[in-house]
Amino acid sequence: MLAWTVALDGRDVDGESGNRWPIVITCEHGGNRIPVLYRGLFHGHQRQLESHRGYDPGALVMGRALAAAFAAPLLVSTVSRLLVDLNRSVGHPRLHGEAIRKAPAEVRRRILKRYYQPYRAQAERLVRRAVADDGLVIHLSSHSFTPKLDGKVRNADIGLLYDPARQREGELCERWKASLRTCAPDLTVRRNYPYAGKGDGLTTWFRRHLPPDAYVGIELEINQKHVFTAGRQWTAMRKVIIESLRGALANRSAGLCR
C-alpha cells in the first residue's frame, strides 16, 4: 500500500467540474497506520497511536470535504506521524516518534525513502503545477488539535495559521476569519493559534522556495472536541468552514450561510 494517496480532478458540491480557484489540499496527519514491517517497534505504543500524538482526528474528513467542495487536488497520508511526521523538516527532533528515534539509522533512512520523500515530492508537484497553470496556488493543509495539552485548555474552535510576513496569507486569513464570524458567530476563531504559522512545517518549506505572489499557504486547525462530538455538529462545522472559505475567496460573506 502506498504511503499516501492523491485524488485529482474532483467535482464541487454542485457537481460542476473544474477548479474555480487554484487550490491544493494536503493532509499530513490523516491516520495512525503503522506498516507491517515496523509494527514490532510499536508494541506498547497503541494508546499513543490512538491519541492526538499518533494522528489528527478529523483532519482527513475535513480535507476530503474541502477537496470535494473546491474541486481541488487532495494529497493524503494515513501513516502515523509517530513513524514519520510529514509536516516536519528532516533533522527536526520530532521528525520521528520515540520508537523510531531509538531504531538504527538505517531504519530511519528507509522510512524517509519510502514514506517521507515520495509525499513531499508529490506535494511539490501539485503545488508547482498549480503555479504553472494559474500563476498562484492556495495551499490548504488540514490539521486538528487536542482540546487540552499538558493540562492547559486551548481556547479556540478554529485556528488559521500563516506567516505574518506574507501579505496575501494575512489578508486571506483575515477575510476567512471575518467570514466565519458571519457564518458562525459562536465559534472562536484565532489566527496563528494554537501554533505559530511560521514554525517548521510543509507550508514553511514552500515559502522558502516560492515567492509570496505565487504561494499562499494556510494551515487549518480544528479543535478535536468538535470531531469527537460527531453527528450533526461535526457535519455542520465542516459546512461552515467550506462556505466561509467561499466567502473569503469571493471577498464577501453575505448570503452564504443558509
Image: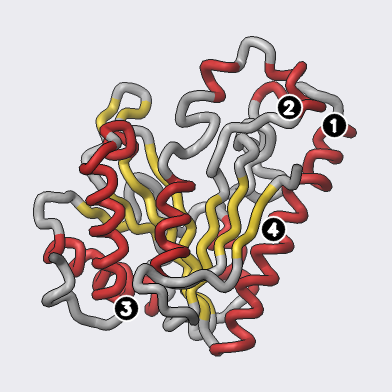
Q: Earlier in the sequence, mark 4 or mark 2?
A: 2
Q: Residue at x 76, y 16 (%)?
A: 40
- Is residue 165 in view? no
Of callouts 3 and 1, the N-terminal one: 1
Q: Amino acid at mark 3?
A: Leu
Q: Which mark is residue 107?
A: 1
Of mark 4 and mark 3, the one earlier in the sequence is 4
At x 63% / y 10%, what residue is drawn? 44
Disc 2, SS: helix
The residue beneath circle 3 is 249
Please state which amino acid type lies under the numbered disc 4. Arg
Residue 105 position within the rendered picture, expressed as x and y whole percent measured from the top left: 86, 32
Proximity of marks 3 and 1: CB atoms separated by less than 8 Å: no
Kind of residue at disc 2? Ile
* Disc assigned to residue 100: 2
Gap in angstroms between the C-alphas marked 4 and 1? 19 Å
Along the line of sight, the residue nearer the viewer: 72 or 26: 72
Residue 2 visible: yes
